[in-house]
Amino acid sequence: MQLDGKCPDGPMATRWSRYKQSLKLVAPANRRKYEVLVIGTGLAGASAAATLAEQGYHVTALTILDSPRRAHSIAAQGGINAAKNYQNDNDSVYRLFYDTVKGGDYRAREANVHRLAEVSANIIDQAVAQGVPFAREYGGTLANRSFGGVQVSRTFYARGQTGQQLLLGAYSSMMRMVGTGKVTLKCRREMLDLVVADGKARGVIARNLVTGELERYVADAVLLCTGGYGNVFYLSTNAKNCNATAAWRSYKRGAYMANPCYTQIHPTCIPQAGDHQSKLTLMSESLRNDGRVWVPKKAGDKRPATEIPEEERDYYLERRYPGFANLVPRDVASRAAKTECDADKGVGATGRAVYLDFEEAIGRLGEDVVRDRYGNLFDMYERITAENPYKTPMRIYPASHYTMGGLWVDYDLQSTIPGLFVLGEANFSDHGANRLGASALMQGVADGYFVIPYTLPHYLAQQKAGGMDDAHPAFEEAEGDVRENVEKLLSIQGQTTVLELHRDLGKIMWNKVGMSRNAEGLTEAISEIQDIKKTFWSDVRVPGTKGEFNKELEFAGRVADYIEVGELLARDALAREESCGAHFREEHQTEDGEAKRDDENFMYTAAWEFKGDGVEPALHKETLTFDECKPTQRSYK
Amino acid sequence: METTMNLKLLVWRQPGPDAPGKMEEYDAKEISSDCSFLEMLDLVNEDLIKAGKQPIVFDNDCREGICGCCGMMVDGVAHGPDHGITICQLHMRHFHDGATIVIEPFRSRAFAVIKDLVVDRTAFDMIQAAGGYVSFQTGSAQDANAILVPKEKADLAMDAAACIGCGACVAQCKNASALLFTSAKVSQFALLPQGDPERKARVKNMLAAHDAAGFGSCSNEGECEAVCPKEISISNIARLNRELIRSNF
């Protein structure tokens, strides 16, 4: 299959507006005849469901959680970017576009990114109109701050809860449509397979998580808004229920998976304390504005921080990157921390941490100012670690955070299966090989509020509404496959728990497919992951039955999929013989140890096609071209 | 300093909404003081699964105190003994070696038990659907700075909007009232100009949905505020009452 990104051509600044003019419409009276299925109700899903229902389509929305308000978009802290230029500091759509393309290390589609930058201003307007309580100046105008090393102030925020407030805004709009009956909301439902009939996505099989019953949902189009696969690392900043199952099973039905090796490891997380640990907590990146990162100069130095004199401390980010110092981008800061820990300079009981020290800032600003700026984060840190960061430096370590890879989509957000659209983190489209701060929320809502409401009708206008019966053989077959899979999981009754297998997978992923990768480690990882797969399917123990509320059964299905996602991730990393953004191949680095891109051979999106269980997937390449942003080496010296 | 402890758990087990429930006793052995409360339950569950028994079911998701998914009564207090946090943020260092801990689901007629510690909080979504929004068509918004909001008002609205909808307020209230939740939403929109055109209908409709769901009335005891993990103030309930009176004129 030839991958066609369907990117419009011509001047970049007018591509989206010209493209919109070419899209077909559905007449208002016909819209209610179309059934749109939205899987996942985070920022992308809730905003899409609300918008499409407002336009008159009938929407059914499924979420695995008890309420759409709990989707993991809620956990995003920092803010959302928008090219408003409210600060008169020379920001523009072009600058936001350029920063995002460069930040993604020239591995994103220019046209998509430009559209994102363009609609960013509408997102803020929309959210404010919905009553999202963004921070304000005394004159009543919106406040902004700068974020992630960007040179302008374009980040809008609602305390440290921007994701929560944006999600609640989208959720409230969706609940309004639930109240009018235009959205049918189904909570505690998990999509377990995609139904493809006559080459088109026509519905899903979902499990009612309370009763265990399998349900058939028929639709004219299916929208996957199911987030990323960061939990493949077991320990991550993702919520416990975040999973890849809906996307992965769509992959197995013919949707291509793009760039799975692009996973963002966030540098400022609270380090793991022990094997009991179930997840990692992110500390806001803003801490690096005033905190200094260091480790002892001497390897194996186990003295407490207070006993290590100034001249025996190595402020390695300041030393290696004098230009950006402690504010280097996420991928650079993460790798540098790993390098120090690998050299036995890591601190704390596990040695897998570096210090983030506020002593100098407290001396310069006073404890009150530091408390004012970061007090809630310091409290959170103390609650988790029982250490007082005003007295002793924080310990931080990188953790799996966001996945830039995902299902391949074209400019319409349509996957390789007609009728299957993929929005937000679940698709691969806008961030390239690395994601800048405050851009994840931007993409989620842009896709839901401002892209899909234009591109989906174009597809629907070319389809006859309805006409599909849930007794169609494609539904029979998909439901049969799901039932068989569930029964198999329950029948094994081995000795190993789902949690143990997930932890084992996570260790391989973290050590060999994590912050830096090499061919040897990746090859080993693929074989070790295949071993875990064998153990899983011969020795997993899933308690309980299928006809009840059974969380272990839910997790078992998701971990089974993570094992396969992990293998593809490693394959993709092995095939990409270059370093770019968050993907660092040790064989491809500059003399200074920085990421070395190979634009000549790897300026493409890798899209993987499923070829059957146990069969190597096929690699397809979508060539990337850069008309506006000429690729340059990223340097932070 | 990490220590380990052994605990006795008394946990409410209930296979389904219509099945009778009962307290069961479990041992939590060699638990690290660095564990969170939910990680302690994860470890107990691993032992139960290995022993061929049914694990304890509880809702949880972000484990960062923001999604509002988790919540249980620990020794009679919603989200446990520490103030201003959800149960996922409570660490075992707050307990003593040898302690007995009583764990029950959030109790309220409107929150039916689904299984063990999991309850049905759909009623909150229905209250939201009854008016917890600004009716606004996507894509037609004017420039955001055309709506000026005084900083003080925006901050108060944000205080109210911080509610995570966990249901602790209901569980702790002797009347099982959900007014802290409802009033937080009503307050957010009452404080902002965007919410003004619908304010009269909003408060009436949301209160009607609140009552229809089976939640009780507020008798101003303040237990909701005391256990709220986001420290939502009961002054929001006073604001809701003023909004209700105002809606009659």
Image (spheres, helix red, strand yellow):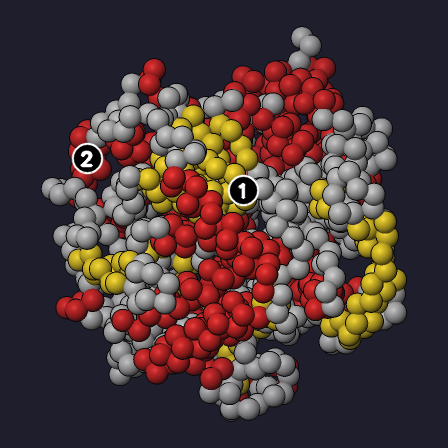
Q: Disc 1 residue type? A: Leu
- Relative to A319, residue A409 above or below: above
Q: Position of residue A322 (x, y in %)?
A: 36, 74
Q: Position of residue B47 (x, y in %)?
A: 73, 68
User: In which quadrant will I find the N terminus of chain B?
Assistant: bottom right
Q: Quadrant of the C terminus of chain B?
A: top right
- 2 or 1: tag closer to the N-terminus: 2
Could you tell me residue B126's position as x and y percent? 63, 28
User: Which disc, if any, is residue A19?
Assistant: 2
Q: Secondary structure at mark 2?
A: helix
| Left or right side of B168 for A600 | left
Q: Residue at image x 39%, y 74%? A: A526
- Residue with the mark numbered 1: A214
Q: Position of residue B222 (x, y in %)?
A: 82, 37
When the figure is inspected, residue A124 is found, relative to residue A520, above or below; the finding is: above
Residue B193 shows up from this direction: no
Q: Residue at x 49, y 27 (%)?
A: A183
> On what subunit does the disc labeled 2 rest?
A
Give residue A302's quadrant in the image.
bottom right
Q: Nearer the viewer, residue A577 or A340?
A: A577
Residue B187's tag is none
Q: To which quarter of the image does residue A353 belong? A: bottom right
Frontmost of labels 2 and 1 is 1
Q: Nearer the viewer, residue A367 or A604?
A: A604
In the picture, measured across the screen, residue B176 lies left or right of residue A343, that is right
